[in-house]
Image (cartoon, helix red, strand yellow):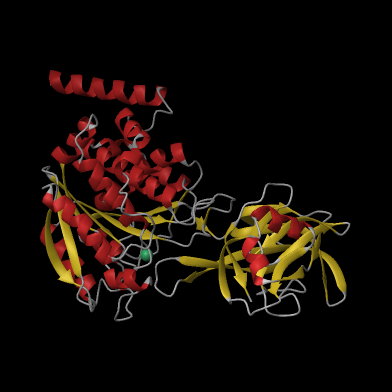
Amino acid sequence: MKIKLLVIFNLLLISSLHVMSQPAINSAAVEKVWAQYNKYKEPAITNRFMKHAQMMPLIQKHVDSKFVSRDEIGKSVRDRSINHLIAGRGKTKVMLWSQMHGDESTATMALFDMFNFLSAKDDNEGLRNLILDNLELHFVPMLNPDGAQAWKRRNDLEIDINRDARMQVTPEGRALMELAKKLQPQIGFNLHDQNYLYSSGRSKNSATISFLAPAYNYPKDMNDVRKRATQIILSMNKALQTKSPGNVAKYNDDFDPRCFGDTFQGMGISTILIESGGYYQDPEKQFIRKLNFLALLNAFESIATASYEKEDLKDYDLIPENDNSLYDLFIKNVTISKEGHEFKTYLGINRTQIRNPDNSGMTYSGRIAELGDQELMFGYDEIDATGLKFTPARIKTMTRAEWDKLSPNQELDLIKGGYLFVKWSDSKSPVGAVKNRLLSLTNNKESPVEEAGIGQSAHFLLTRDGKPVYAVVNGYKVDLGQPAKVLSNTYGY
Ligand SMILES: [Zn+2]
């Protein structure tokens, strides 16, 4: 009895300390690893388009060092291995699988960073051993390698694996289900990416990480299994808020028995969905990769110490839901002329992602997505165009050799003179993405964009008294008062 009382007293002390000592939300050990993240970041993964053939040597490295043991739990439709990696010697089984959707790779990158942290030998041994002594970790990185190869959501049977938990017609889905049934882990992490234009509630904040503790039935009841998943989410939410305040949201929790998360929750596995969305000026998701690493590290620590049990379920209601209030670029109060009418309006502009032919990367094509009055809409970038006029740009003619020699400053000067396009006088210029430029190319006599319209390519000037103040180039904002900086890609028409 005495011991019990002492324990209760200690718990009270700890929880009162916890309240008093905010905002120390991450443990000192987690903070230290965050500060040293670059040491663990897997250098072989330089972008989000990693393929199965590039991943396998990284797995082998960790097998060779005896950090993980590996077994093959199945093969994809195209015979690529599906790998199950085991680390840790604890009694709580945690299973994590990533990239069930082939074009959602942020967590896969973070998992390899996590392997590097967990297998390192350095002065972060305390946190590392806490995790490895208390958890038995089961990883399935890149569940859909065929989808990753083609950079597409579905598998090569054209089935969405995350709608295949019930019918299990995909070899990838079957492998995951069989593993879950065999292991019966207490906790599962279902790691995905979501639309980068999702916002956290109706706000300017992107939903960089969205969570869900999926429902296990239509009434969306709460039981101990789902409660534990929710509490772990609350712990991760607090960790993320310290690094990226306001950029966390939660996913719709409507029950869908076709989904793995919902099904696993019903099987008694506390399942957590993590969706990586967008972040300002991080199209390649490398900061989001780091946030994934942090979320998982925090989760492992809180599972190892059971500290998540302190989380109050009511706090889950405070996390905003995913919403759609973001554009890539939002232009407010611009004056446009259309069909002989002049009026003030808002323009919402998005940059569509286009896969490279070899699926090794993306180019972007900016278009006007919306025109008209808008309320509670925002942009990753915004322009207050009060007093500014939408003005079509001109075409500058020059030789190909002159184009090749143009410096960014010279390109910026041309934009200030009203030009956004170059036409080669001596040859035909290429059509498609033009990398690391400010100006676009055209083979036409007339500007591709004469007036603002939905679906139009987003190349135009915003002028005051005829003088360009901003340019919009392929959907990117170019502030003409700032130094020249080339864009990821412009376009050839
Ligand atoms: Zn997904």
The answer to which image quadrant residue 326 occupies is: bottom right
Q: Position of residue 65 (x, y in %)?
A: 13, 47
Q: Is residue 268 visible?
A: no
Name the residue: 27% across, 35% down.
307
Q: Position of residue 351 (x, y in %)?
A: 57, 65
The answer to which image quadrant residue 490 occupies is: bottom right
Q: Position of residue 8 (x, y in %)?
A: 23, 24
Name the residue: 75% across, 69% down.
396
Is 236 located above or below residue 371 in the figure? above
Residue 210 falls left or right of residue 177: right
Tell which of 255 and 29 is nearer to you. Answer: 29
Q: Quadrant of the N terminus?
A: top left
Is 482 located above or below residue 221 in the figure? above
Q: Is residue 380 visible?
A: yes
Q: Quadrant of ligand 1?
A: bottom left
Residue 165 falls left or right of residue 463: left
Residue 141 falls left or right of residue 481: left
Q: Position of residue 363 (x, y in %)?
A: 51, 67
Name the residue: 40% across, 23% down.
21
